[in-house]
Amino acid sequence: MKTKLRTTYLVTVLFFLFVTVGSMILFYNMFSEEFIISNNKDTMDNLFETIQEMNLAQLTKEEKNVLKDYTDKGGFVTIMDGEKIIYQSKLYSKRRREGRVDYYLDEYTYNAQAQVNVERTVIKLKGKIDQNVKTYYVYMDTRLKSLENSINLISKFMLVEMIIILMLGIPFSFYMAQRTVKPIEKLGKLAKKMENNEPINFEEYDFPNNEIGNLSDQMKSMYLKISSNLNELNNYNYLLKTQNKELIEFDERRKKFIGAATHELKTPLAIISTQLEMMNMDNDEAMSEYYESIMEEIQKMSNLIREMLNSSFEGDIILSGPMKVDSLSELLDGMKDKYMGLFWSKKANCRFDIEDNIYINMNNEQIEQAINNYIINAYEHIPEKGTAVVTLKSVDDKAVISVFNSGHNIKEEELSKIWEGFYQTDERAKESNVGLGLYIVRNIVKNHNGVCYAKNHHNGVEFVMEFNRTDKY
């Protein structure tokens, strides 16, 4: 359960008042008596020093006033010359006056200091002063009984004062808590409306001209800026949605057009290719050169159509293809015979190095397509009598497929660009493809949570793809 700020504020103020006043009373009761005694002793010692500087044979009016001031504060002074009393504080009767003087002159000293008697009822000073071949005796005392009564009276007064302070402090603290917390509660309601994006009329909120008022002004400024920015964002969002919808529709039309166009082109190309093969069966050597040239161009167009068709549908295929845990070793082993014959047509050496029992979670058709693109890419760039190596191995928890082909390196600045759709290096621009093979590989590998990259070696280029290995079951 949350504690309200008003309650916390009220309790804190009352606790502070109680502790402060209570500590004052406790401190006064513990140390007031010693403090008063010490203060009276210092006053008595100072007065004795002042008397030592007076002409005791003939006291002036000002000097008598100094002694009278001490008497008026509750002290008693008697000055004697051994024969008679030179000065004495006024008392109610002669008997009381004589009883306040100590006539044991041998107890008087020149460097006298005020002392408290054993019973702690009176402070006395008995001093001796030599002036003009005469010895004067100064007796001073202060009764502690009156001081004790004063202390008790002050203690009672302070107790009553504490009660009064607490009685007045409770309503005052409640008033101050209400005055302090109420604007904060208003700020809370204002912030709640901002959170719920409700319309706000700031004229309904009245805040004091202090830090809380400044905070409310800042919240108002922040709210207006946020509202303005939200309105602009909503406008931009509407425009983006509209443009995104148009782009999606355009992309769909593009895919349909490319798919339809490439599909329609495949049929006449197949017919042309078949008829040319039949015509070549006559073995007319004069026509043989033309035949090979036409078949080369038909192959180029066929490759172009194939890659465009793959590009048209690769996004949907990659997103929708089912996956299962299967043997990558067996998949790659089943592909090697087909590609070894392909490289033999270039009199190139192709070697497969496949580690057994490597499993990943995959879509077999997509992974086969990615490996196919790597191998075809190596075939297209391998020189005659070159070397190609297809490798599958496990490295820690990864399944690593690499395809190396001897030949020219790829420029370092192009190693990251070759994965983009329709990108061609300077050498590739002369080939029959349009730069979609590696783009498709990248998307297939990404869909399988893997990574792919290429790196140069001193005698060729290696293309790599890595996947997370899994258990067989």
Image: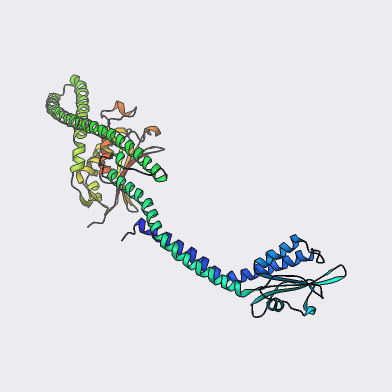
Residue found at the far top of this picture: 286
Quadrant where the N terminus is found in the figure: bottom left
**Residue 467 visible (yes or no):** yes
Residue found at the far front of this picture: 93
332 and 61: which one is in front? Answer: 61
Q: Is residue 98 above or below residue 290?
A: below
Horizontal arrangement in the rendering, residue 62 relative to residue 439 (left or right) = right
Q: Is residue 76 above or below residue 390?
A: below
Q: Quadrant of residue 412?
A: top left
Q: Position of residue 468 (x, y in %)?
A: 29, 50
Q: Residue at x 19, y 19 (%)?
A: 286
Q: Quadrant of residue 198?
A: top left
Q: Is residue 303 above or below residue 167?
A: above
Q: Quadrant of residue 96?
A: bottom right
Q: Position of residue 16 (x, y in %)?
A: 45, 61
Q: Residue at x 68, y 67 (%)?
A: 71
Q: Is residue 120 above or below residue 287?
A: below
Horizontal arrangement in the rendering, residue 318 relative to residue 225 (left or right) = left
**Residue 26 visible (yes or no):** no
188 and 362: which one is in front? Answer: 188
Quadrant where the C terminus is found in the figure: bottom left
Q: Position of residue 405 (x, y in %)?
A: 33, 38
285 and 306: which one is in front? Answer: 306
Q: Residue at x 67, y 76 (%)?
A: 93
Q: Residue at x 42, y 60 (%)?
A: 168
203 and 29: which one is in front? Answer: 29
Q: How many marks?
A: 0
Q: How has the structure been colored for display?
A: rainbow
Q: Position of residue 42 (x, y in %)?
A: 69, 67
